[in-house]
Amino acid sequence: MENEAKKKVLSCIQPSGMLTLGNYLGALKNWKNMQEEFDCTFAVADLHAITVRQEPAKLRSQIYSTYALMLALGLDPEESTLFIQSHVPAHSQLSWLLSCYTQFGEMSRMTQFKDKSAKHADNVNVGLFSYPVLMAADILLYKPDFVPVGADQKQHLEIARDIAERFNGIYGDVFTVPDPYIPKIGARVMSLQDPTKKMSKSDENLNAWVAILDTPDDIMRKFKRAVTDSEAKVCIGEEKHGINNLIGIYSAITGKTSDEITAEFEGKGYGDFKLAVGEAVAEELRPIREKYDCIIKDKAALEALYREGAEKAGYVARKTLNKAMKKVGFVL
Ligand code: TYM
Protein backbone atom coordinates (compact mmCIF):
# COMPACT_ATOMS: atom_id res chain seq x y z
CA MET A 1 0.00 0.00 0.00
CA GLU A 2 2.75 2.39 1.01
CA ASN A 3 4.43 2.15 -2.39
CA GLU A 4 1.26 3.15 -4.21
CA ALA A 5 1.45 6.63 -2.76
CA LYS A 6 5.09 7.12 -3.64
CA LYS A 7 6.25 8.72 -6.87
CA LYS A 8 8.25 6.46 -9.14
CA VAL A 9 11.90 6.66 -10.13
CA LEU A 10 13.83 4.68 -12.73
CA SER A 11 17.40 4.73 -13.91
CA CYS A 12 19.99 2.42 -15.46
CA ILE A 13 23.73 2.20 -15.81
CA GLN A 14 25.87 0.46 -18.40
CA PRO A 15 28.19 -2.31 -17.24
CA SER A 16 31.00 -1.06 -19.44
CA GLY A 17 34.23 -1.22 -17.46
CA MET A 18 34.92 0.36 -14.12
CA LEU A 19 32.33 2.85 -12.96
CA THR A 20 33.70 6.32 -12.26
CA LEU A 21 33.40 9.14 -9.79
CA GLY A 22 31.35 10.82 -12.56
CA ASN A 23 28.81 7.98 -12.52
CA TYR A 24 28.76 8.22 -8.73
CA LEU A 25 28.24 11.97 -8.35
CA GLY A 26 26.10 12.39 -11.47
CA ALA A 27 23.76 9.48 -10.83
CA LEU A 28 24.42 6.71 -8.30
CA LYS A 29 24.67 8.90 -5.19
CA ASN A 30 21.22 10.28 -6.02
CA TRP A 31 19.80 6.83 -6.58
CA LYS A 32 20.68 5.99 -3.03
CA ASN A 33 19.29 9.26 -1.69
CA MET A 34 16.01 8.83 -3.57
CA GLN A 35 15.46 5.29 -2.38
CA GLU A 36 13.49 6.14 0.75
CA GLU A 37 11.21 8.78 -0.65
CA PHE A 38 10.42 7.13 -4.00
CA ASP A 39 9.40 3.77 -5.41
CA CYS A 40 12.66 3.03 -7.25
CA THR A 41 13.66 0.70 -10.08
CA PHE A 42 17.32 0.48 -11.10
CA ALA A 43 18.93 -1.71 -13.74
CA VAL A 44 22.23 -2.75 -15.19
CA ALA A 45 21.76 -1.78 -18.85
CA ASP A 46 23.68 -4.69 -20.35
CA LEU A 47 21.89 -4.59 -23.73
CA HIS A 48 23.24 -1.08 -24.22
CA ALA A 49 26.81 -2.23 -23.72
CA ILE A 50 27.02 -4.19 -26.97
CA THR A 51 26.68 -1.15 -29.21
CA VAL A 52 30.48 -1.27 -28.99
CA ARG A 53 32.29 -4.59 -29.32
CA GLN A 54 32.68 -6.42 -25.98
CA GLU A 55 34.81 -9.36 -24.96
CA PRO A 56 32.27 -11.96 -23.68
CA ALA A 57 34.06 -13.01 -20.46
CA LYS A 58 34.79 -9.40 -19.59
CA LEU A 59 31.23 -8.28 -20.25
CA ARG A 60 29.91 -11.10 -18.05
CA SER A 61 32.16 -10.13 -15.16
CA GLN A 62 31.28 -6.44 -15.56
CA ILE A 63 27.56 -7.21 -15.38
CA TYR A 64 28.14 -9.06 -12.09
CA SER A 65 30.35 -6.35 -10.73
CA THR A 66 27.98 -3.52 -11.66
CA TYR A 67 25.08 -5.31 -9.95
CA ALA A 68 27.27 -5.93 -6.88
CA LEU A 69 28.26 -2.28 -6.86
CA MET A 70 24.61 -1.20 -6.81
CA LEU A 71 24.21 -3.27 -3.65
CA ALA A 72 27.47 -1.94 -2.17
CA LEU A 73 26.23 1.60 -2.69
CA GLY A 74 23.40 0.83 -0.32
CA LEU A 75 20.62 0.16 -2.82
CA ASP A 76 18.33 -2.23 -1.02
CA PRO A 77 16.65 -5.01 -3.04
CA GLU A 78 13.88 -5.18 -0.44
CA GLU A 79 13.03 -1.55 -0.91
CA SER A 80 13.87 -1.01 -4.60
CA THR A 81 13.74 -3.22 -7.69
CA LEU A 82 17.29 -4.03 -8.85
CA PHE A 83 17.65 -6.08 -12.00
CA ILE A 84 19.60 -6.81 -15.17
CA GLN A 85 18.01 -5.33 -18.29
CA SER A 86 18.42 -8.37 -20.58
CA HIS A 87 16.55 -10.54 -18.05
CA VAL A 88 13.35 -8.67 -18.86
CA PRO A 89 12.54 -9.25 -22.55
CA ALA A 90 9.91 -6.51 -22.55
CA HIS A 91 12.75 -3.97 -22.98
CA SER A 92 13.70 -5.32 -26.42
CA GLN A 93 10.07 -5.84 -27.37
CA LEU A 94 8.93 -2.32 -26.52
CA SER A 95 12.06 -0.95 -28.15
CA TRP A 96 10.96 -2.42 -31.51
CA LEU A 97 7.48 -1.00 -31.11
CA LEU A 98 8.77 2.45 -30.23
CA SER A 99 11.30 2.45 -33.05
CA CYS A 100 8.34 2.49 -35.43
CA TYR A 101 7.21 5.73 -33.77
CA THR A 102 10.62 7.41 -33.90
CA GLN A 103 11.96 9.32 -36.86
CA PHE A 104 15.31 8.72 -38.49
CA GLY A 105 15.92 12.47 -38.43
CA GLU A 106 15.50 12.80 -34.65
CA MET A 107 17.93 9.95 -34.01
CA SER A 108 20.48 11.51 -36.35
CA ARG A 109 20.59 14.60 -34.15
CA MET A 110 21.73 12.77 -31.02
CA THR A 111 25.11 14.17 -30.03
CA GLN A 112 26.21 10.96 -28.30
CA PHE A 113 25.63 9.05 -31.56
CA LYS A 114 27.70 11.59 -33.46
CA ASP A 115 30.53 11.38 -30.88
CA LYS A 116 30.51 7.60 -30.61
CA SER A 117 30.28 6.95 -34.33
CA ALA A 118 33.26 9.25 -34.86
CA LYS A 119 35.16 7.33 -32.16
CA HIS A 120 34.22 3.87 -33.46
CA ALA A 121 34.21 4.65 -37.19
CA ASP A 122 34.78 0.99 -38.06
CA ASN A 123 31.62 -0.13 -36.25
CA VAL A 124 28.80 2.37 -36.73
CA ASN A 125 26.11 -0.25 -36.19
CA VAL A 126 22.34 0.18 -36.22
CA GLY A 127 22.19 -0.52 -32.47
CA LEU A 128 24.42 2.49 -31.78
CA PHE A 129 22.03 4.59 -33.85
CA SER A 130 18.80 3.36 -32.27
CA TYR A 131 20.20 3.16 -28.72
CA PRO A 132 18.01 6.06 -27.46
CA VAL A 133 14.88 4.10 -28.46
CA LEU A 134 15.94 1.20 -26.25
CA MET A 135 16.61 3.71 -23.50
CA ALA A 136 13.12 5.17 -24.01
CA ALA A 137 11.71 1.64 -23.65
CA ASP A 138 13.73 1.11 -20.44
CA ILE A 139 12.14 4.20 -19.02
CA LEU A 140 8.56 4.09 -20.31
CA LEU A 141 7.95 0.47 -19.25
CA TYR A 142 8.09 1.51 -15.57
CA LYS A 143 6.07 4.76 -15.82
CA PRO A 144 8.53 6.73 -13.69
CA ASP A 145 7.88 10.32 -12.62
CA PHE A 146 11.63 11.04 -12.42
CA VAL A 147 14.76 9.71 -14.08
CA PRO A 148 17.95 10.58 -12.17
CA VAL A 149 20.86 10.95 -14.62
CA GLY A 150 23.94 13.06 -15.28
CA ALA A 151 23.79 15.98 -17.73
CA ASP A 152 25.10 13.88 -20.64
CA GLN A 153 21.83 11.88 -20.75
CA LYS A 154 19.54 14.91 -20.96
CA GLN A 155 19.11 14.72 -24.74
CA HIS A 156 18.22 11.01 -24.55
CA LEU A 157 15.63 11.78 -21.93
CA GLU A 158 14.10 14.47 -24.05
CA ILE A 159 13.66 12.04 -26.92
CA ALA A 160 12.05 9.52 -24.53
CA ARG A 161 9.57 12.22 -23.54
CA ASP A 162 8.89 13.08 -27.18
CA ILE A 163 8.26 9.43 -28.05
CA ALA A 164 5.93 9.02 -25.06
CA GLU A 165 3.96 12.14 -25.96
CA ARG A 166 3.68 11.07 -29.59
CA PHE A 167 2.45 7.58 -28.68
CA ASN A 168 0.00 8.94 -26.10
CA GLY A 169 -1.18 11.47 -28.68
CA ILE A 170 -2.24 8.65 -30.99
CA TYR A 171 -3.44 6.00 -28.53
CA GLY A 172 -4.39 7.80 -25.31
CA ASP A 173 -2.76 7.64 -21.94
CA VAL A 174 -0.33 4.71 -22.17
CA PHE A 175 2.98 6.14 -20.91
CA THR A 176 3.90 8.57 -18.15
CA VAL A 177 6.01 11.44 -19.49
CA PRO A 178 8.95 11.51 -17.05
CA ASP A 179 11.00 14.45 -15.84
CA PRO A 180 14.79 14.28 -15.77
CA TYR A 181 16.35 14.61 -12.33
CA ILE A 182 19.77 16.13 -12.84
CA PRO A 183 21.75 17.16 -9.75
CA LYS A 184 22.71 20.83 -9.40
CA ILE A 185 26.25 19.85 -8.45
CA GLY A 186 28.08 16.84 -9.89
CA ALA A 187 25.97 16.49 -13.04
CA ARG A 188 29.06 16.77 -15.21
CA VAL A 189 32.27 15.63 -13.57
CA MET A 190 35.20 16.44 -15.87
CA SER A 191 38.43 14.62 -16.64
CA LEU A 192 41.22 15.31 -14.13
CA GLN A 193 43.73 15.56 -16.99
CA ASP A 194 41.70 17.54 -19.53
CA PRO A 195 38.96 19.30 -17.59
CA THR A 196 37.23 20.49 -20.75
CA LYS A 197 36.23 16.84 -21.38
CA LYS A 198 33.74 14.68 -19.45
CA MET A 199 35.26 12.18 -17.02
CA SER A 200 34.84 8.83 -18.76
CA LYS A 201 35.89 5.25 -18.10
CA SER A 202 36.85 4.91 -21.75
CA ASP A 203 39.59 7.54 -21.36
CA GLU A 204 42.94 5.89 -22.08
CA ASN A 205 44.75 8.19 -19.66
CA LEU A 206 44.18 6.37 -16.37
CA ASN A 207 44.98 9.50 -14.37
CA ALA A 208 42.03 11.26 -15.99
CA TRP A 209 39.35 9.34 -14.12
CA VAL A 210 38.73 7.93 -10.68
CA ALA A 211 37.02 4.56 -10.37
CA ILE A 212 34.53 4.06 -7.56
CA LEU A 213 36.58 0.98 -6.63
CA ASP A 214 40.01 2.69 -6.73
CA THR A 215 42.14 2.32 -3.60
CA PRO A 216 42.70 5.43 -1.46
CA ASP A 217 46.33 5.52 -2.65
CA ASP A 218 45.27 5.57 -6.30
CA ILE A 219 42.69 8.23 -5.60
CA MET A 220 45.21 10.46 -3.81
CA ARG A 221 47.75 10.04 -6.63
CA LYS A 222 45.21 10.98 -9.29
CA PHE A 223 44.06 14.09 -7.44
CA LYS A 224 47.64 15.20 -6.74
CA ARG A 225 48.27 15.05 -10.50
CA ALA A 226 45.03 16.80 -11.45
CA VAL A 227 45.54 19.57 -14.00
CA THR A 228 44.85 23.08 -12.66
CA ASP A 229 45.98 26.60 -13.69
CA SER A 230 48.70 29.04 -12.68
CA GLU A 231 46.59 31.47 -10.66
CA ALA A 232 46.87 29.56 -7.37
CA LYS A 233 43.55 30.81 -5.98
CA VAL A 234 40.83 28.34 -5.07
CA CYS A 235 37.76 29.99 -6.60
CA ILE A 236 35.37 29.53 -9.52
CA GLY A 237 36.59 31.27 -12.68
CA GLU A 238 35.67 31.26 -16.35
CA GLU A 239 38.96 29.82 -17.56
CA LYS A 240 39.68 27.76 -14.43
CA HIS A 241 38.25 24.48 -15.75
CA GLY A 242 40.42 22.25 -13.55
CA ILE A 243 39.71 24.14 -10.32
CA ASN A 244 36.02 24.52 -11.17
CA ASN A 245 35.84 20.76 -11.55
CA LEU A 246 37.66 20.10 -8.25
CA ILE A 247 35.41 22.61 -6.44
CA GLY A 248 32.37 20.83 -7.93
CA ILE A 249 33.59 17.44 -6.74
CA TYR A 250 34.46 18.72 -3.25
CA SER A 251 31.12 20.51 -3.03
CA ALA A 252 29.13 17.45 -4.15
CA ILE A 253 30.78 15.36 -1.46
CA THR A 254 30.98 17.75 1.49
CA GLY A 255 27.81 19.74 0.78
CA LYS A 256 29.83 22.99 1.10
CA THR A 257 29.10 25.87 -1.30
CA SER A 258 31.82 27.22 -3.59
CA ASP A 259 32.07 30.39 -1.44
CA GLU A 260 32.61 28.29 1.67
CA ILE A 261 35.29 26.31 -0.16
CA THR A 262 37.06 29.49 -1.31
CA ALA A 263 37.02 30.74 2.29
CA GLU A 264 38.33 27.41 3.61
CA PHE A 265 41.36 27.52 1.29
CA GLU A 266 42.07 31.25 1.51
CA GLY A 267 45.84 31.72 1.62
CA LYS A 268 46.50 28.03 0.84
CA GLY A 269 47.90 26.65 -2.41
CA TYR A 270 46.45 24.22 -4.91
CA GLY A 271 48.52 21.41 -3.37
CA ASP A 272 46.56 21.60 -0.09
CA PHE A 273 43.27 21.84 -1.95
CA LYS A 274 43.99 18.81 -4.14
CA LEU A 275 44.91 16.79 -1.06
CA ALA A 276 41.67 17.76 0.65
CA VAL A 277 39.57 16.83 -2.39
CA GLY A 278 41.43 13.51 -2.74
CA GLU A 279 40.88 12.70 0.93
CA ALA A 280 37.18 13.58 0.80
CA VAL A 281 36.70 11.35 -2.25
CA ALA A 282 38.74 8.48 -0.78
CA GLU A 283 36.74 8.59 2.47
CA GLU A 284 33.41 8.75 0.65
CA LEU A 285 34.26 5.74 -1.53
CA ARG A 286 36.07 3.62 1.08
CA PRO A 287 32.98 1.98 2.65
CA ILE A 288 31.53 1.26 -0.79
CA ARG A 289 34.69 -0.56 -1.89
CA GLU A 290 34.85 -2.53 1.35
CA LYS A 291 31.25 -3.62 1.02
CA TYR A 292 31.74 -4.46 -2.64
CA ASP A 293 34.69 -6.73 -1.82
CA CYS A 294 32.39 -8.84 0.41
CA ILE A 295 29.38 -8.87 -1.89
CA ILE A 296 31.21 -9.91 -5.06
CA LYS A 297 32.51 -13.07 -3.37
CA ASP A 298 29.05 -14.59 -3.01
CA LYS A 299 27.84 -15.25 -6.56
CA ALA A 300 24.95 -17.47 -5.40
CA ALA A 301 23.51 -14.70 -3.26
CA LEU A 302 23.93 -12.23 -6.10
CA GLU A 303 22.17 -14.55 -8.49
CA ALA A 304 19.22 -15.01 -6.14
CA LEU A 305 18.85 -11.24 -5.88
CA TYR A 306 19.03 -10.44 -9.58
CA ARG A 307 16.60 -13.23 -10.43
CA GLU A 308 14.10 -11.93 -7.93
CA GLY A 309 14.67 -8.38 -9.20
CA ALA A 310 13.95 -9.49 -12.78
CA GLU A 311 10.74 -11.12 -11.69
CA LYS A 312 9.51 -7.98 -9.96
CA ALA A 313 10.57 -5.77 -12.88
CA GLY A 314 9.16 -8.19 -15.46
CA TYR A 315 5.72 -8.09 -13.89
CA VAL A 316 5.50 -4.31 -14.15
CA ALA A 317 7.14 -4.17 -17.60
CA ARG A 318 4.84 -6.80 -19.13
CA LYS A 319 1.75 -4.91 -18.02
CA THR A 320 2.88 -1.73 -19.80
CA LEU A 321 4.09 -3.63 -22.86
CA ASN A 322 0.78 -5.47 -23.19
CA LYS A 323 -1.18 -2.26 -22.90
CA ALA A 324 0.93 -0.59 -25.61
CA MET A 325 0.67 -3.64 -27.92
CA LYS A 326 -3.09 -3.86 -27.48
CA LYS A 327 -3.48 -0.19 -28.36
CA VAL A 328 -1.48 -0.69 -31.56
CA GLY A 329 -3.73 -3.60 -32.54
CA PHE A 330 -1.80 -6.74 -31.74
CA VAL A 331 -3.72 -9.85 -30.67
CA LEU A 332 -2.67 -10.82 -27.14
P1 TYM B 1 26.14 5.53 -18.42
O1 TYM B 1 26.22 4.09 -18.09
O2 TYM B 1 27.14 6.09 -19.38
O3 TYM B 1 26.25 6.38 -17.10
C1 TYM B 1 25.44 6.10 -15.96
C2 TYM B 1 25.05 7.40 -15.28
O4 TYM B 1 26.23 8.15 -14.92
C3 TYM B 1 26.13 9.48 -15.43
N1 TYM B 1 27.48 9.96 -15.76
C4 TYM B 1 28.02 11.11 -15.32
N2 TYM B 1 27.53 12.07 -14.51
C5 TYM B 1 28.34 13.12 -14.22
N3 TYM B 1 29.60 13.25 -14.72
C6 TYM B 1 30.13 12.33 -15.54
N4 TYM B 1 31.37 12.46 -15.98
C7 TYM B 1 29.32 11.18 -15.87
N5 TYM B 1 29.53 10.07 -16.63
C8 TYM B 1 28.39 9.34 -16.56
C9 TYM B 1 25.23 9.36 -16.66
O5 TYM B 1 24.61 10.58 -16.98
C10 TYM B 1 24.23 8.31 -16.23
O6 TYM B 1 23.18 8.88 -15.49
N6 TYM B 1 22.26 5.47 -21.57
C11 TYM B 1 22.66 5.49 -20.17
C12 TYM B 1 22.21 4.24 -19.42
C13 TYM B 1 20.75 3.99 -19.54
C14 TYM B 1 19.71 4.72 -18.88
C15 TYM B 1 18.50 4.08 -19.27
C16 TYM B 1 19.70 5.81 -18.02
C17 TYM B 1 20.17 2.99 -20.26
N7 TYM B 1 18.82 3.04 -20.11
C18 TYM B 1 17.27 4.53 -18.79
C19 TYM B 1 18.47 6.27 -17.55
C20 TYM B 1 17.28 5.64 -17.94
C21 TYM B 1 24.18 5.52 -20.10
O7 TYM B 1 24.87 5.15 -21.03
O8 TYM B 1 24.67 5.90 -18.89
Image (spheres, rainbow, N blue to C red):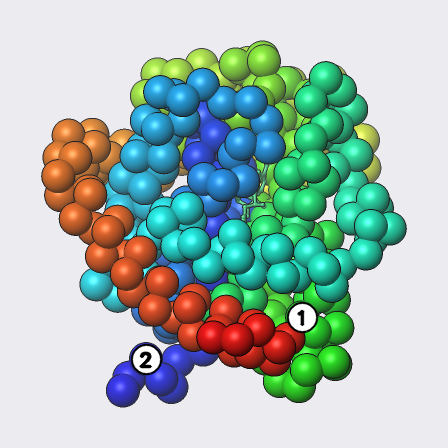
Residue 187's spot in the image, x, y percent?
60, 48
Does dot 2 land on a helix, a strand or a loop?
A: helix
Tell me the number on the disc at residue 57.
none
Q: For mark 1, give the secondary structure.
A: helix
Mark 1 burial class by Cα count in 10 Å: few <14, some 14-19, many 20+: many
Q: Nearer the viewer, residue 52 or 289?
A: 52
Residue lying at the far front in this picture: please name it.
Answer: 331
Q: Identity of the amino acid at label 2?
A: Asn
From the viewer's perspective, is 222 left or right of 200?
A: left
Identify the amino acid type marked 1.
Ala
Counting the numbered discs, the total is: 2
The residue at the point 64 percent across, 44 percent down is 131
Q: Depth check: 325 or 16 in front?
A: 325
Residue 127 locus on image (x, y percent): 64, 38
Answer with the quarter of the image where residue 194 lies.
top right
Residue at image location 39% in from the left, 16% down from the top: 218
Which residue corresponds to mark 1? 164
Mark 2 and mark 1 lie on one chain; the one further toward the N terminus is: 2
* Quarter of image, ligand 1: top right
Q: Tell me if residue 100 comes above or below residue 37 in the rendering.
A: above
Residue at the spot 42% in from the left edge and 49% down from the top edge: 85
Residue 183 makes an appearance in the image: no
Residue 179 drawn at (x, y percent): 62, 69
Cα separation, mark 2 vs mark 1, equals: 24 Å
Residue 300 in percent (x, y) is at 13, 39
